[in-house]
Amino acid sequence: MDAMTATRKVLLVDDHELVRIGVKTSYPELMGIPISWCESETLEDAVRVYGEEDDIDAVLLDLNLADCRGLQGLRLFLQAHPEARVAVFSGTQDEFVVRQARAMGALGYVCKGALTSKLQETLIALLMPGGSGMAAANANLFPRTSSSIMYDRVAELGPRHLEILELVLSGCTNQEISSSTHLSLGTVKNYVSSLLLALDVRSRSHLISLFH
């Protein structure tokens, strides 16, 4: 079997068994190329499986798992395996989340409510020769987002501010953010205050309402 028709291996990370069954059943092969599916239902297991299976070609990663929240899961997975070709596979369609997933290194973003052709397009981009470059360059692998002053301001934030913002938008309290980031509670409060100032919003609830 030549390289063009060799089996491709995909790691599907989702905590709903029916979702995993549905995806695997829908895509036993793609354009005549067999797909071998690996599965994980937690981020911790996904990191382990990817490390043990040295020939995984792509990863479909849900953002809401039992052991991680939102974009933190993508961040942690790519920290552990920066070479991985990851597409987010999520029910979340929030514009901020889509933009940040792309900025953090995801090569595609598929909403679970999208047409099956969208997932097929993403898999082709990730699995075919040169797919990672195609995915990185092809805006069609991400849901369309609007341009706004708010998102321009977000783009100017530093990495730590973005991390705090992600957690705020996930509904975390200052204490939960402190525990997650290992920053003192006072430092977290300062970061949140500076976020409100930088984004020109009145309150935490006002900030959250702009992204949901």
Image: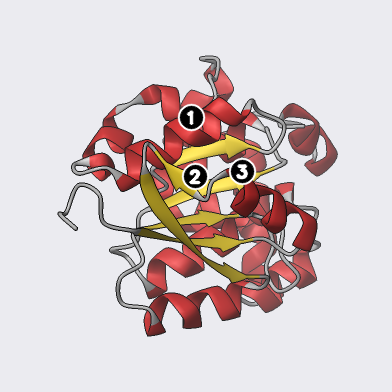
Q: Nearer the viewer, residue 62 or 197?
A: 62
> Nearer the observer, disc 1 or disc 2?
1
Q: Quadrant of the N terminus?
A: bottom left
- Crowd rating for badge 3 (residues with CA inside 10 Å; few <14, some 14–19, many 20+): few
What mark, if any, has residue 26 been given in the picture?
3
What mark, if any, has residue 101 been given in the picture?
2
Q: Is residue 83 visible in this depiction of the protein?
A: yes
Pick whichever of labels 1 and 2 is earlier in the sequence: 2
What's the residue at 68%, 73% (across, down)? Answer: 178
Q: Is residue 35 above or below residue 81?
A: above
Residue at image mark 1: 142
Kindly identify the amino acid type of the residue bearing the numbered disc 1. Answer: Phe
Q: Quadrant of the C terminus?
A: top right
Q: Nearer the viewer, residue 16 or 145?
A: 16
> Nearer the observer, disc 3 or disc 1?
3
Kindly identify the amino acid type of the residue bearing the numbered disc 3. Answer: Ser
| Occupied quadrant, residue 3 | bottom left
Across and down, in percent, residue 14 comes to 67, 61
| Occupied quadrant, residue 111 | top right
What mark, if any, has residue 34 been given in the picture?
none
Asked which secondary structure carries label 2, the reply is: helix
